[in-house]
Amino acid sequence: MCIDQKACFPPTIPNGKYTESSDGWYEERHILRIRCDPGYEQLNQIATASCLNGTWSSLPICEKSITSCSGPPQIPHAVVIQEYQEVFAADSKVLYQCETGYATEERHTNTSIYCVAGSWSWSETSSCSNGNANAAA
């Protein structure tokens, strides 16, 4: 099978996805719509690219959204119990497990924080302690 010289090969879009061609290439004038991964958004609102004469025009760039968060903070005496990510979309929830012998003020062995407008919603009630410190208060 011959590929037209004006066809385009699949582009690489870091932190973005698109519907892949079944035959591994795209005909001239094909338009791709790029969807950025959660926590990312299109730079300058550009979401499409066109195949023109064998090259892609204006490939979208997916950049970290200002409302997303970087990796979650360390909470003393607790570990994150979910898959690691570099970027968390706004309203993402991260779960922590308190170390053995430690619990939150409400006596829970799990705690969680949320990504809110680019910052983590950590508070003292998210902390894990061994209970002795609370008894003295």
Image (cartoon, rainbow, N blue to C red):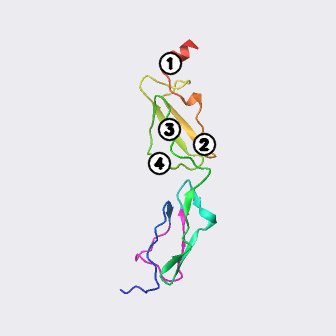
If you read the primary sequence from the N terminus, does the residue marked by circle 4 or circle 3 appear first? 4
Q: Position of residue 112 (x, y in %)?
A: 53, 36
Which image quarter holds the N terminus?
bottom left
The residue carrying mark 1 is 131
Front tag of 4 and 1: 4
User: What's the CA distance linking mark 3 and mark 1?
Assistant: 21 Å
The image quadrant of residue 105 is top right
Q: Residue at x 52, y 50 (%)?
A: 87
Decide: marks 3, 1 in contact (CB < 8 A)?
no
From the top left corner, tell me how far across and down residue 73 is, in percent: 52, 38
* Dot 2 crowding, Cα within 10 Å, few <14, some 14–19, many 20+: some
Q: Which residue sits at x=58%, y=28%?
A: 125
Please tell me whether residue 68 is drawn above or below residue 62 in the rendered image: above
Q: CA distance from mark 4 to mark 1?
A: 31 Å
Query: What number is the disc on residue 119?
Result: 2
Q: Earlier in the sequence, mark 4 or mark 1?
A: 4
The mark nearer the N terminus, 4 or 2, is 4
**SS class of the residue under badge 3?**
strand
Q: Residues within 10 Å of mark 1 (few under 14, many from 20)?
A: some
Say whether disc 3 or disc 2 marks the residue closer to the N-terminus.
3
Of circles 3 and 2, the one toward us is: 2
The three-letter code of the residue at mark 4 reads Gln
- State the predominant SS element of the stretch in magenta: loop
Quickly name the residue at label 3. Answer: 95
Q: Amino acid at mark 3?
A: Leu
Numbered circle sitting on residue 110: none
Residue underneath mark 4 = 85
Asked if labels 3 and 4 touch by Cβ distance under 8 angstroms, the answer is: no
* Marked residue nearer the N-terminal end (3 or 1): 3
Q: Which residues are magenta?
A: 18-35
Distance from disc 2 to disc 1, alpha carbons, whole Å, reads 28 Å
